[in-house]
Amino acid sequence: MDSATSEPRTTSAPRTTSETRTPLDASADNGLKIVIVGGFGAGKTTMVRSVSEIRPLNTEETMTRAGEAVDDVSGVRGKTATTVAFDFGRITLDSHNVLYLFGAPGQERFWFLWDRLFSGTLGAVVLVDTRRIDDSWYAIDRLEKHGTPFIVACNDFGGPAFTPEQIREALDLDPHVPLVTCDARSRESSKLVLITLVEHIRALYADLSRAPRQELV
Amino acid sequence: MSRPGRDDAPDRLYTLTQGRSRSGPDNPFDLVTLVVAECDPVPGMQSEHAAILRLTGRPAAVVEIAAELELPVSITRILLSDLLAAGRVSARHPRKAAVPDPDILEQVLVGLRNL
Ligand SMILES: Nc1nc2c(ncn2[C@@H]2O[C@H](COP(=O)(O)OP(=O)(O)O)[C@@H](O)[C@H]2O)c(=O)[nH]1
Ligand SMILES: [Mg+2]
């Protein structure tokens, strides 16, 4: 653990806002992203909260109807701008690496902003409520097209139990994509979901480097 | 006057960034770029700039700054480019690569297992 004195700015910095904010180590220098995608009520915020070291925060991005993020600020003045909201949490992995977890709704309009917000993401968890499996079709489709590594996690709401085969079938899931069940309210279970994703990513890229001509689609 | 944020009139956002446009493709700030203040706020500074400097005494990600300021990410990125250009903040960008560095993936796994 770095001591506060290792970073001169820390002592001279004005301390104004809520001390409830947990500051990062002064040595933190590499932000990483994982996105949790799922329909409304699938448990995204719950999962972020279960593993995050900060209370999940909410923010938004503004985009025009054409799908451009509003960086031409005058564009906001027209009537064509809409916003998409997403929440996020944070996990300090070590003194350099900080993992940010984003909860993103899988709905269509959000995908206009995917590149903008989530380029460079390590991978995604598709969080599925098995009572509403079809909520996930669109997200899976987009992730596949995009070449973003992902796994599927079924959040157990105590509905009728499906076999993994039934779920794979309903999702038309590629056999190499890991499928796990989880309880987003549990820290341990949510942690395992993330570990499964990162192990999957590692295996994918290890395969790629062994077979360089293989395309990741 | 309400806090800047979601219910803002577009004109308010326009004023915040002085109508400046491009946060563009060349804006270097990623959602998880870690920003660190290089100076203290000074009197007369735009209040959002001062707020950013107060939030970044220790590293804070762009997305955290946006959430704290209750501003859209794109507007926050414009404010940050101003501060960066003026040398008032520094930026630690994520190490981006077409394929993730296996060492980093290993570090992520170790970090997660230690949670
Ligand atoms: N039974 C059960 N309820 C859950 C689980 N995960 C989330 N919930 C509940 O489902 C509701 C919606 O979860 P939320 O995280 O807000 O969904 P989001 O819209 O995807 O962010 C909340 O009331 C949660 O408490 C779970 O694993 N099991
Ligand atoms: Mg939510």
Image (cartoon, coloured by chain):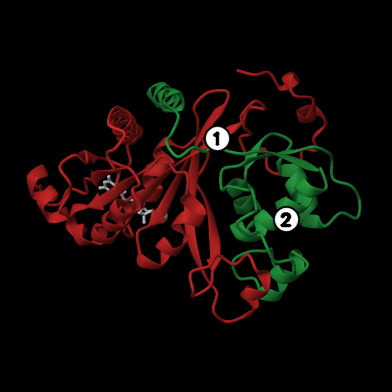
Chain colours: A red, B green
Q: Which residue is mark 2?
A: B79
Instruction: Decide: few, some or many residues near mark 2? Use Cα within 10 Å; few <14, some 14-19, many ≥20.
Output: many
Q: Residue at x 33, y 34 (%)?
A: A201
- Give A76 or A160, whichever is nearer the viewer: A76
* Residue found at the very far bottom of the displayed protein: A79
Read off the residue under disc 1.
B95
Tag 2–tag 1 contact (CB < 8 Å): no
Give amino acid for label 1. Answer: Arg
Position of B39 with respect to A25 (left or right) is: right
Q: Position of residue A180 (x, y in %)?
A: 21, 38
Instruction: Give above or below for A113 relative to B19.
Output: above
Left or right, B85 with respect to A215, comes to: right
Q: Farthest residue to the right: give it.
A: B43
- Mark 1 Cβ inside 8 Å of ligand 2: no
Label 2 CB sits under 8 Å from any ligand 2 atom: no
Residue drawn 33% across and 32% down?
A: A205
